[in-house]
Amino acid sequence: MERTEMEVFLALSEELHFGRTAERLHVTTGLVSKTLKKIERRIGAPLFERTSRHVALTPIGRDLRDDLLPLYEGIKLALDRAELAGRGIRSTLTAGFMGTQAGRILSAARGVFERRNPHCGVRVVETRLDHHVTQLRDDGADLLLTALPVLEPDLTVGAVVTSGPRYVCLAADHRLAGRGSASFEDLAGETFVSVAGSAPEYWSDFHTPRRTPGGRVIGRYPEPCATYAEALALVADGRAIVPGDGQLLVLYQRPDIRFVEMTDMPPVEHGLVWRTRDDADERVRAFADIVLEIAPALAVPGTIPGVPGAAGSRTVSGMA
């Protein structure tokens, strides 16, 4: 069976509709029907039961689908690997992550990428709060999955990978700890953590605003944090509060801290960022595509898959 015949048969076995199959393969319904008849003549038995309202696999069709699918996927994988290798996807790609959820996503993406591109390895490294985007500029990473916003003229924001409501992390005995939700104005008089290192003011001002909408002051702790673990230590000690997203409830549970949803603050977004000069780098683009492919299955409750963004988009987000 030719590859195009396999594609038509397998697509029809999934869609069970000639029109949708034709749209998916960018061919005519007539070609789908003609190809199917050719396969059935060769086999000597019908593969689908079909009427004007119903299309279903016959037992022989189901068996053929089950036998062909792993073979077809193997052929496609081999061709994809050869194509990517031919376009220069070799050597090693370094991907940085900020936050536990981003680390889980990049680690899973590494496995998929390396299976598809055996000539190119992936190194996954952490991006700390105090790094911001310095790893891109000192060649410590080729791509980041990090908390937005990133508003840098030499960097491309390729896509939002996860998005969700914002939470604040509080000490277990904090005045707001027993509430399911709170408003921005409720943070008046509180103290946010401050971030050490290269985080720009626009990033810090968004994640840890200095005033409520009503103009009331929100402080910042005088000793800056370099990592989220350091920030949580200050929270547990009752010295500060720290923002984050839905992953906090699943991945950062501790008996001495609590999480409260902020219903009127902008959502938390984590996105892919790379050097603009690397826009044409096949390694970066291929890895970014895989991250977007697998992220929906790995996003924890409370965060949702993001949407592709225009190159250089100016989005905003949260910290953890």
Image: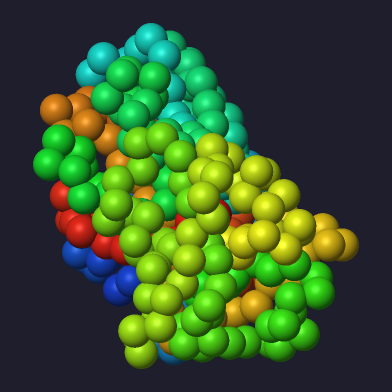
Question: Residue visible at 35% across and 12% down?
Answer: 90
Residue 77: x and y in percent read 45, 30
Q: Name the side, left or right, on which 10 lies relative to 191.
A: left
Q: Residue furthest right?
A: 255
Nearer to us in this view, 116 or 261:
261
Residue at 50 percent of width and 81 percent of height: 188
The residue at the point 55 percent across, 45 percent down is: 223
Against 196, residue 75 (above or below) is above
Q: Is residue 203 visible?
A: yes
Q: Is residue 73 visible?
A: no
Residue 202 higher or lower than 141, as above or below: below
The quarter of the displayed image where residue 230 is located: top right
Q: Position of residue 264 (x, y in %)?
A: 44, 86
Task: Check the picture and name the quadrant holding the C terminus.
Answer: bottom right
Return the x and y of residue 305 as percentages of the image width and height.
47, 64
**Left or right of 111, for residue 79:** left
Closer to us: 53 or 122 = 122
Residue drawn at the location 34% of the way across and 84% of the way down = 215
Q: Is residue 250 left or right of residue 125?
A: right
Residue 308, percent from left and from top: 29, 58
Location of residue 37 by image quarter: bottom left
